Amino acid sequence: MSTKTLSPDVERVEALAHTHVMDCYQCGKCSAGCPVADRMDVIPSGLMRMVQIGEVRQAAGTMSVWQCLSCQTCSTRCPKSVHVAEVIDALKQIAFEKKLIHPKLRRVAIFQKTFIDTVRRNGRLNEIELTGFFKLSGFFNDFSIPKLMADGQLAVPMILRNKLHFKPGSPVKDKAVVRRIFEKCFKETKKKTT
């Protein structure tokens, strides 16, 4: 076992992912089981290798981290119990913080952030709020009017079929519980990465 010290970037990934990236011995089972590996610019085992050799920022800047479905197949298949999916989630967080999001997938990142922010604010998902914030944030990212107006023609048929609800669903009984969960997660992340 090597006693080589890890770079601060690799240590950060390990702290966020709660795993030891050096345990990965590149068997490739994570990539073989990944349902979207054929569409990725860097397959999961390649991302793991990039992190192992200290290329964390390069790995965070790939399209692959935003194409991951978070299905956990890679982590489940790992014979060394390396949390590959969590490493990819850590790379997403680093991409956000360091502004390394691949330009072609910025809208995916905006959607994920908007989704989490909506749940954090309301204690549950509010589809109208999610759609509004996502469309506006996406527009201010690339100023694309066609993308802003996309899906607008679906509103009337959805309303007629009672599939689009303007009122939020039943309120969460205790939003404070959801707020505390988020606060605890952010505290834990901050504590482990400082």
Image: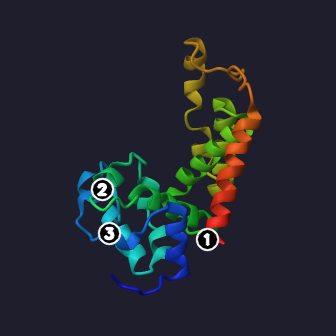
Q: Quadrant of the N terminus?
A: bottom left
Answer whether labels 2 and 3 touch (C-beta < 8 Å): no
Answer whether labels 1 and 2 touch (C-beta < 8 Å): no
Query: What's the residue at 49%, 59% (across, down)?
Result: 104
Q: Which of 178 and 70 is in front in this view?
A: 178
Q: Which amino acid does label 3 sit on?
A: Cys
Is any part of residue 44 visible from this angle?
Answer: yes
SS at mark 3?
loop
Comes first in the chain, label 3 or label 1: 3
Query: What's the residue at 73%, 23% (across, down)?
Result: 171
Residue at mark 1 to residue at mark 2: CA–CA distance: 25 Å
Residue corresponding to mark 1: 98
User: With respect to residue 22, does 36 lie above or below?
Assistant: above
Q: What residue type is labelled 2?
A: Ala
SS at mark 1?
helix
Percent position of residue 154, x then y: 55, 26
